[in-house]
Image (cartoon, helix red, strand yellow):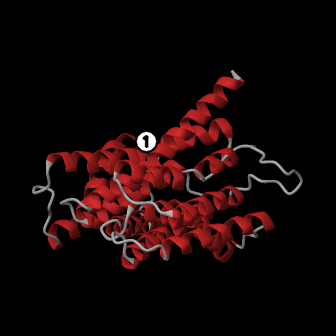
Amino acid sequence: MFRSDRLLGYVAGLFAISCWSGFVLVSRMGGQGTLMPVDTVALRFMVGCTILLPLAYVYRPWFNLKGLALALTGGLGYCFFVYAGFQHTTAVHGAVLLPGLIPFLSALFAIILLAEKINVLRGIGLLLIGVGAGLMLTEPSAQASLFGDALIVMSVVCWALYTVLAKRWGISAWQATTTVAYGSLLLFLPIYFLGFESKLAAAPWEELLLQGFYQGFIAVIVAMVFYMVAVERIGPSNMGAMMAFVPVVSGLGAVIVLSEPLNAHGVLALCLTSLGALFAAGIISLRTPKIVLNGLGK
């Protein structure tokens, strides 16, 4: 039973990695399609809120100032910046900047807002992540612009702030999910239909199906389920270590699926970011020279 539980946890962790890596690829596809970022944001929360409706009765959203802050950071701010960013930069760049910088900026906000302290190895990990991100920002690419990279960084700022606020206020994962989804929907949908020219009707059905299904179902719900199962079975440390592979998986996926170029500059940035994420997750112990798998966390 013990081994089967851990095996289930690692399988769930692999699926979570696949979901988050796929998010980078699908979002880049969306950035090159018919839909504008505002259309994708609206589609994400319309689909997500429809599927989450049964859970909303159990994990009631926070309709207060804290809920507003969570919806503006983890919902609208994160989504708008990330979808707009992938109109102007590549999935390879996003693979480093998006999953790579989240632990870096989350730690920075935790120091500022939660007065958390960072040990030496975690500091080394965050430094490696910063160097990897800096390399990617300076990596020459005809398909990527500094403006697009900056938008991705802004999305990370929003997500990191959301993560720290959710921790500070002690909101559960599912309640945070429903709060962000329904809060974002209520805030954005009236503005979207009254202030923007919707392209949902003009988009090909294949694009609507892909973006609606992935952004509203896979990214919002399925990734969360697999992540929670993995954390329960193998612990937050081990799941955190597995998350270090998201930049590499999504970066290689961009090369294979989207035929994006990956030069030595990009490879070094991916490797440094993933290695830094391993350090930042607390996987390497000062007392042993080997990697100790004691459980994973995001």
Query: Quick check: 144 above or below 254?
Result: below
Is 276 positioned to the left or the right of 183 in the image?
Answer: right
In percent of the image, x 37 and y 66: which residue is there?
76
Residue at the extreme top: 1
Q: Residue at x 14, y 61 (%)?
A: 199
Q: Nearer the viewer, residue 278 or 8?
A: 278
Q: Is there any visible trace of residue 58 in the rendered image? A: no
Which residue is tagged 1? Answer: 222
Task: Determine which quarter of the picture holds residue 154.
Answer: bottom left
* Horizontal side, residue 189 vs residue 245: left or right: left
Nearer to us in this view, 156 or 166? 156
Q: In the image, what residue type sits under mark 1?
A: Val
Q: Is residue 221 above or below residue 69?
A: above
Residue 188 point in image, percent of width and height: 28, 66
Extreme residue in the front direction: 264
Q: Position of residue 264 (x, y in %)?
A: 53, 63
Q: Quadrant of the N terminus?
A: top right
Q: Secondary structure at mark 1?
A: helix
Residue 127 percent coordinates (x, y):
68, 71
Q: Dot 1: few (<14), some (14–19), or many (≥20) neighbours within 10 Å?
A: some
Q: Depth check: 213 or 68 in front?
A: 213
Q: Residue at x 10, y 55 (%)?
A: 201
Viewer-proximal residue among 22 and 275: 275
Kindly identify the residue that appears in the image at 30 percent across and 60 percent down.
185
